[in-house]
């Protein structure tokens, strides 16, 4: 019965005779995961409690498109989390911006030198219409201001 919610049609899982599938003859698109091109789970904030700790007791820096909250952690390496409210846009827009932030952070050369911090990037509604380059400049500027990791006993010298 066609149109019935429980009805299933038989679908052939065998590849097409010409090696192509789909109606336009193109092969199916599958995302290619390359080694080292994703952000490891150990570098992501996963628990709500970690986000709340950043918001409530951490420090905050403001950019034109994002807020950056950060607080030291005891893990020994930086972790990042990204948040966006519905004011930023619908789910498609929010997820696109989150993917961009993740990619900006992943490719940022200063990432390896960061102190052990929990970072939360919160998108402002103004980020909705921004381009990748504008977002990247804003996020990189805020991350650079957080500062590199310092060794014990090392003091920041004043230049001037």
Image: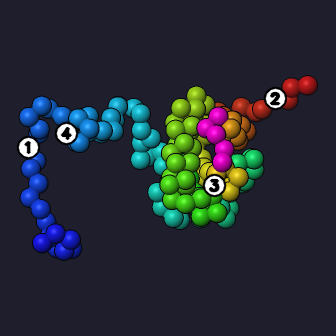
Q: Secondary structure at mark 4?
A: loop
Q: Earlier in the sequence, mark 3 or mark 2?
A: 3
State yes or no: residue 132 in magenta: yes
The residue nearer to you, when weighing 31 against 49, is 31
Q: Secondary structure at mark 3?
A: strand
Q: Secondary structure at mark 1?
A: loop
For the view shown, which residue lies furthest in the top direction? 160
Report the residue marked by disc 3.
122
* Lateral position of residue 128 relative to residue 40, left or right: right
* Lateral position of residue 83 relative to residue 130, left or right: left
How would you classify the magenta stretch by its main secondary structure? Answer: helix
The residue nearer to you, when weighing 116 against 95, is 95
Report the residue marked by disc 2.
157
Rendering coords of residue 46 (x, y %): 46, 57
Rendering coords of residue 118 (x, y %): 58, 50
- The answer to which quarter of the image holds residue 84 is bottom right
Q: Earlier in the sequence, mark 2 or mark 1?
A: 1
Q: Which mark is residue 14?
A: 1
Rendering coords of residue 159 (x, y %): 86, 26
- State the CA–CA distance, disc 3 to disc 4: 41 Å
Locate the C terminus and report the quarter of the image it occupies.
top right
């Amino acid at each position: 019965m066609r149109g019935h919610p429980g009805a299933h049609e038989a679908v052939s899982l065998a590849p097409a005779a010409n090696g192509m599938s789909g109606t336009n003859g193109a092969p199916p698109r599958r995302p290619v995961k390359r080694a080292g091109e994703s952000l490891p789970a150990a570098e992501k904030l996963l628990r709500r409690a970690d986000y709340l700790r950043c918001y409530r007791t951490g420090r905050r820096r403001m950019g034109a498109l994002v807020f950056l909250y950060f607080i030291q952690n005891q893990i020994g390496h930086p972790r990042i989390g990204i948040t966006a409210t519905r004011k930023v846009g619908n789910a498609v827009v929010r997820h696109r911006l989150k993917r961009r932030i993740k990619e900006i952070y992943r490719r940022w050369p200063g990432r390896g030198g960061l102190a052990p911090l929990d970072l939360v990037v919160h998108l402002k509604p103004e980020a909705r219409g921004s381009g990748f380059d504008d977002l990247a400049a804003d996020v990189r500027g805020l991350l650079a201001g957080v500062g590199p990791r310092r060794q014990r006993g090392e003091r920041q010298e004043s230049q001037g």
